[in-house]
Amino acid sequence: MDRIDRRKRAPLGRQIYERVRKAIDTGILAPGARVASARALASELGVARGTVEAAYQRLAGEGYLLARGPAGTIVSPNLPHAPRAGRVEAPAGSAGTGRLAPIDKPAAKSATPAPMPLQLGIPALDAFPRKLWSRLAARRVRMTLPADLSYGDPCGEPALRQAIAAYLHVSRGVACDAEQVFVTAGYRASLALAAGVLLERGDSVWIEDPCYPPTRAVLEQASLIPTPIPVDDEGIAVAEGERWAPRARMAVVTPSHQAPLCVSMTVARRLALLDWASRANAWVFEDDYDGEFHYAGPTLPALKSLDADDRVIYAGSFSKALFPSLSLGYLVVPNAVAARFAKAMEAGPSRSPRLEQMTVADFLTGGHFARHLKKMRLLYSRRRAWFADALHEVFGDRVQVDQTRGGMHLVVRVRAKAGDRTLARRAQREGMNCQPLSERHAKPRRRDQALLMGFTNVATAGEARQIARRLRDAFEGD
Amino acid sequence: MDRIDRRKRAPLGRQIYERVRKAIDTGILAPGARVASARALASELGVARGTVEAAYQRLAGEGYLLARGPAGTIVSPNLPHAPRAGRVEAPAGSAGTGRLAPIDKPAAKSATPAPMPLQLGIPALDAFPRKLWSRLAARRVRMTLPADLSYGDPCGEPALRQAIAAYLHVSRGVACDAEQVFVTAGYRASLALAAGVLLERGDSVWIEDPCYPPTRAVLEQASLIPTPIPVDDEGIAVAEGERWAPRARMAVVTPSHQAPLCVSMTVARRLALLDWASRANAWVFEDDYDGEFHYAGPTLPALKSLDADDRVIYAGSFSKALFPSLSLGYLVVPNAVAARFAKAMEAGPSRSPRLEQMTVADFLTGGHFARHLKKMRLLYSRRRAWFADALHEVFGDRVQVDQTRGGMHLVVRVRAKAGDRTLARRAQREGMNCQPLSERHAKPRRRDQALLMGFTNVATAGEARQIARRLRDAFEGD
């Protein structure tokens, strides 16, 4: 119970003094942090300004606060940091206690640790055109009119929906209207939305085996029954699916590059899948998270482009094509169900900030998106070759790298006594975030032992060799 | 079926020509829109650059495209707009067909219509410090490091969680650590998250009667049973709740200013509610969406500040305190369940872009938030008085305005033959978006007839009088 209360025995000023002091003592207010002005806090608490000023003066006298005149009042930078669990600690290597927080600068670098080498599903962060993006975002935020601060269309900004439709039409062979495009917070939100609109609790859903773990998690959260169907060299084994779960209401697939095996679904298999969906009156959820990153031969058109019977829900994401912290993805749905999706978006919790949406729209319509993807295809193709070469050079015939034509990681089979989980754990201990394939299988067999290694952030041939050597050292103990 | 396909009879160039032409014919590519460069599209489709160039040249020859040399290729601005359902129409009053879209400028103004007068729940959009915000956001986006582009903490940016904890501690009397704060996409996402973590399907939940309609919608979507409990002059009638739904697992309440009646929950009622929660082992979800906007007497501390038994989940939002298109809110949860919330956030679909989060963190720690709220309290108190005065002046004793101490709208009781739904419809027809109170009641009684009118965007005393007169005219026909 910690409130400014007129009926308490303690005078109001004393209560304010104690509240602020407690926040400092417990470290919630860190040394160097700015506190509300006496005027603003007095307004907030509905007390006289003098009351707050007196409390602040006492705190300043005791060394807790430092008044800096018109520059405001801060928590004394010379106080030792309060040691407590809840604090955001200073990054290792900083000056330690007594460190002066930057005050008139932005609060803090967000101080994200860089992703670990080999981490999956992260685009080349060093190669993103940050300056161009910054220019577009700054221009967009400068152009903000009062009405733009208000709620936008819950289905997404019209300009972005239109830009996505145009991109998909020309580049991915997906014919759709802006009204069929729904902007979401990313893949999970897209899948949860589609499941909520199209399926009923307890419905069975085909998922690929092996699969991307969040797919299973999202479906289970929606009280659906994910049914793993094996993936072979052509993609999901439709005949197996029909045998084991003929009454499934949806299949969630990654046709461009299967996640995580990176095989591309053949046209024959695509047609078989669509044929099943038509006969079973089921839906196909196409997760096209990295369809743009195909290095050998032409980019594959989306499965959606073959969707004559309107069974395919197409999900795209800007997390790979642009960058993850955007948290922006989209769905393309058949016309016949677009109104139901619109209704769900209106009622649903997912809303994306308009500034991000408009910046992405500018990036697309300005021609930057196609250019960026083209650059990334070249870059990834090079980084992939560097890394595969380095693995072969360092490991010789102790590794085999699956031959795939696209994607953002390699599937690496290591000849070793230890299983892939052990090897992955050893690599992770040495700071390299590769993942064991067998964990992604419902029932891993002997041949499902492999390591998944993201190559997109391996910046040079030298770095590739260095990482390969570190992997070799990490795997030893074997 | 619309794909670039080597096995098709039509030559590749012809297929590209047709795909682009169809996009233009159907209006997906609008006049003035930029198309991908021949080089980028060739890379994307895996065809020779010359093939795309030839297709583009043919389209240019037929007047579909306009090559502008190094400035890129655009859809000819002189083409008439294709008339189709899916298009984003030019705003009324623009030049009509043949209009040149701005090309090197951002794609489009987002062209949001300004909210209608009297719309509920929108802060004063004209009074938001857009320039300051723009400066902070531009600085933040400029400072972006490669690692910042990657996924952030799914629970929210540490700097923002810390800044929220500090603000709540000092200003709202809520003692919490950063680890208890979870950043969400707003109120609905917050409620959905809490329901998902703490409740089971079929659980009964007290909601206020009358209530904020999305509350009911979110609970129903989570397969919970919302049970309306009447609100009286002191807030939710806890005794009624205990009578009708003693086994409820949660109560969703708006203690600062009840939505929509704007009554503040008395301390006695707050204690009774917490007492029930302790005895029933239930949760209290405190929606503090506008607690900062209290005009008579001190800002009320949050119900959470009385929460000795850790039963309260506190939900705040930046939609009212800053602006709606941010789509940013947060939850504060008891320590004992924080780990469960963290796990749900990791698995869940809700992610907020990091740029927005860091900009808000800067706004808070820079002292701008407290200052902004103080200004808004003064401004709203003035706008509220102007509008109430105008209503009394124009309607005389035909209106009665409920005496409340805070909130963002007035509850206006109009003496008229027509019911509040009819009056609201008439006002809406004339472009004023007031809402009927009776619609928010589960079982409206005679005295539950009133109109809810947002005053926050009524900018001057003159505008207030003008709107009051327009309301009077709209209500006639009665």
Image (spheres, coloured by chain):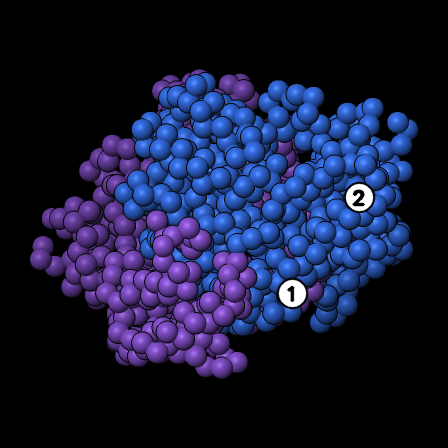
Chain colours: A blue, B purple
Residue A346 seen in the current view: no
Residue under circle 1? A130
Q: Chain of mark 2?
A: A
> Going 82% across and 28% down the picture, which residue do you hit?
A416
SS of the residue under disc 2: helix
Q: In this figure, what is the number of numbered marks?
A: 2
Above or below residue A25? Residue B107 is below
Of tags 1 and 2, the one toward the viewer is 2
Quadrant, the N terminus of chain A: top right
Q: In whole angstroms, how far apart are the C-alphas of marks 1 and 2?
A: 31 Å
Q: Position of residue A11 (x, y in %)?
A: 67, 47
Q: Chain of mark 1?
A: A
Disc 2 marks a residue whose amino acid type is Leu
State the residue in front, B64 or B264. B64
Above or below residue A130? Residue B152 is above
Quadrant, the C terminus of chain A: top right
Q: Position of residue A221 (x, y in %)?
A: 50, 28
State the residue in front, B394 or A273. A273
> Going 27% across and 50% down the picture, which residue do you hit?
B435
Mark 1 surroundings: few (<14), some (14-19) or many (≥20) residues within 10 A: some
Q: Position of residue B380 (x, y in %)?
A: 44, 61
> Going 28% across and 54% down the picture, which residue do you hit?
B434
Above or below residue A162? Residue A143 is below
Residue furthest bottom as drawn: B69
Badge number at residue A391 = 2
Using the rendered image, report if marks 1 and 2 lie on a common chain.
yes
Disc 1 marks a residue whose amino acid type is Arg
Badge number at residue B415 = none
> Going 87% across and 54% down the picture, which residue do you hit?
A94
